[in-house]
Image: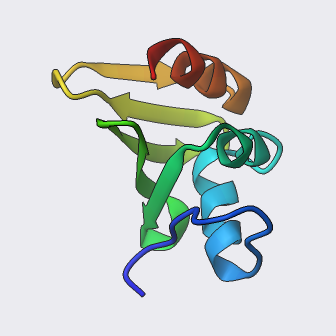
Amino acid sequence: MNGAVIKSPGMEGTEMEAIKTLLGAGASKFYEEAGYSVQTYAGGLRGIVSYGGDEIYVLRHGLRNWEVRDTDGDSFWFGSQWELLAWFGDRL
């Protein structure tokens, strides 16, 4: 498989680990519960988070360093998984 995708509640194994790597282990369950679609690449360091028709490109640059690029080409940086989650909650 080319990437990990949140498909249904209770997903386990390497796909869920890649999603935890991309979005943060603590926050990842909230994306799943809210119905976001998450596809990961590069072992969870890059991915696409989508909800409805919107897709946001996410890059994990380090332990507490995320970059997101929206559909307008704007780039935003976050220093915590909870900041990132709040941004998605406001945005999508």
* Percent position of residue 5, x then y: 51, 66
The number of discs equals 0
Query: Residue 46 lies in what quarter of the image?
Result: bottom left
Farthest-out residue, bottom: 1
* Percent position of residue 70, x then y: 28, 27
Farthest-out residue, left: 72
Residue 40, above or below 12: above
Query: What residue do we see at 72% from left, 25% from top?
Result: 82
Query: Residue 21 lies in what quarter of the image?
Result: bottom right
* Percent position of residue 7, x then y: 57, 66
Q: Name the colour scheme.
A: rainbow
Residue 40, above or below 63: below
Residue 70 in sight here: yes
Residue 30, above or below 88: below
Camera-nearest residue between 52 and 90: 52
Query: Residue 71 lies in what quarter of the image?
Result: top left
Q: Is residue 27 left or right of residue 31?
A: right
Farthest-out residue, top: 90
Residue 73, above or below 8: above
Q: Is residue 26 left or right of residue 32?
A: right
* Percent position of residue 35, x then y: 60, 44
Query: What residue do we see at 58% from left, 62% from top?
Result: 6
Camera-nearest residue between 32 and 48: 32
Q: Is residue 17 left or right of residue 39?
A: right
Instruction: Say which quadrant the C terminus sits in.
Output: top left
Instruction: Say which quadrant the N terminus sits in.
Output: bottom left
Query: What residue do we see at 49% from left, 51% from top?
Result: 37
Residue 79 in sight here: no
Query: What residue do we see at 64% from left, 27% from top?
Result: 85
